[in-house]
Image: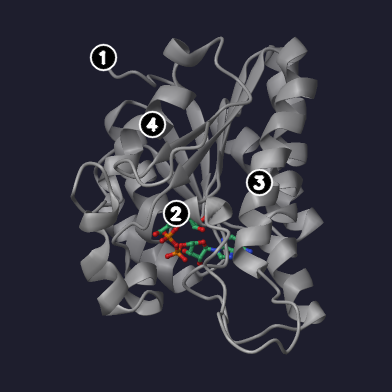
């Protein structure tokens, strides 16, 4: 018997990387899973990977679009009859343009990485309130806590900090949602992964930095997407019934907030 037997979970951005690992682990634990993904090619490949491992559906979703978030929740309800778990994993990470420092682009990153999580929480929570039970797990990042990871050069203008700003926002959103939704039996928690060896990281993080990662962690090793799945499973499970508003850094001991 799995730890998520008969639970219905929406996992955003499950087309690849960490979201796909979450989907795989949740299916192993008996959950029914909706892959809520904007990129149809990635989703198709994820669905092939997950084929035969359990009850899984793809719902094309743009989390930054209000109607699309509502449609995803409605489609899940229609197909599986309920929504127990929302994993807010999707973000601009592989697809982020770190060269852009302008306000328009900052707003774009906010619309996905932070407001997308809020839109999905808003779309799914009424269904959770109805059954007086729910789990929301948001995905922040160790990047939220690394204040000195900004260009060290002659001053030109204030950096956009787009990725870090939004991931710090996700920490705050977690606590605000937890405060409101606890009375309805819904917990809201957050995972802040360290640098994880996904395709996105291999594309974005220079090899020289990747090589140094083990040295920068207490456990002296690199992190794979699968290493994060146990924490997501815990937050989504009955074991975490009274755990809410918490952020867990899963990074082998790199960032250790008080
Ligand atoms: N990989 C890491 O080192 C690392 C570290 C800390 C936090 N994170 C966070 O973990 C999550 C997953 O990381 P990853 O490495 O798998 O990243 P990734 O970029 O490979 O995966 C993100 C997925 O989200 C999807 N997506 C993007 N915009 C979307 C939208 N508007 N609607 C729906 N889906 C959308 C993408 O198509 C992609 O499949 C992200 O939130 C990322 O910020 C990653």
**Disc 1 to disc 2, C-alpha distance:** 24 Å
- Queried on whether the Cβ of the residue with tag 2 lies below 8 angstroms from ligand 1, the answer reads yes
Residue at 57% x, 60% y is 91
Asked where in the image residue 115 lies, by quadrant, the reply is bottom right
The disc placed on residue 170 is 3
Which residue corresponds to mark 1?
Answer: 1
**C-alpha separation, residue under disc 1 versus residue under disc 4:** 19 Å
* Disc 3 crowd, CA 10 A, few/some/many (<14, 14-19, 20+): many
- Badges 2 and 3: C-beta atoms under 8 Å apart? no
Q: Name the residue at the front extreme.
A: 154
Q: Position of residue 158 (x, y in %)?
A: 75, 77
Spot occupied by residue 65 in the image (x, y as percentages of width and height): 76, 61
Residue beneath disc 2: 14
Q: What residue sits right under mark 4 in the picture? A: 231
Q: Is mark 1 within 8 Å of ligand 1?
A: no
Element class at badge 1: loop
Q: Residues under labels 2 and 4: Cα distance?
A: 16 Å
Of callouts 4 and 3, the N-terminal one: 3
Colour convention of the picture: one colour
Q: Is residue 62 visible?
A: no
Q: Dot 4: few (<14), some (14–19), or many (≥20) neighbours within 10 Å?
A: some
Circle 3 — which element? helix
Marks 4 and 3, how far apart in space? 17 Å
């Amino acid at each position: 018997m799995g730890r998520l037997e008969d639970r219905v979970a929406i996992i955003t951005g499950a087309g690849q990387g960490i979201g796909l690992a979450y989907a795989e682990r949740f299916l192993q634990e008996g959950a029914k899973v909706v892959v809520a993904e904007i990129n149809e090619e990635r989703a198709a490949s994820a669905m092939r990977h997950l084929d035969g491992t359990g009850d899984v559906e793809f719902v094309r979703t743009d989390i930054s679009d209000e109607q699309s978030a509502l449609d995803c929740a409605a489609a899940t309800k229609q197909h599986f009859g309920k929504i127990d778990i929302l994993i807010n994993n999707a973000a601009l990470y592989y697809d982020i343009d770190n060269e852009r420092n302008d306000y328009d682009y900052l707003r774009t990153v906010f619309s996905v990485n932070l407001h997308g999580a809020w839109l999905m929480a808003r779309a799914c929570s009424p269904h959770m309130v109805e059954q007086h039970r729910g789990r929301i797990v948001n995905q922040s990042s160790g990047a939220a806590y690394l204040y000195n990871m900004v260009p060290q050069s002659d001053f030109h203008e204030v950096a956009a900090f787009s990725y870090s700003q939004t991931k710090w926002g996700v920490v705050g959103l977690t606590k605000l949602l937890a405060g409101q939704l606890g009375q309805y039996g819904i917990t809201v928690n957050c995972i802040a992964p360290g640098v994880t060896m996904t395709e996105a990281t291999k594309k974005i993080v220079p090899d020289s930095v990747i090589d140094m990662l083990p040295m920068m962690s207490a456990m002296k090793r690199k992190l794979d997407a699968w290493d994060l799945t146990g924490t997501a499973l815990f937050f989504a499970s009955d074991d975490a019934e009274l755990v809410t508003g918490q952020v867990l850094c899963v990074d082998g001991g790199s960032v250790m907030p008080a």
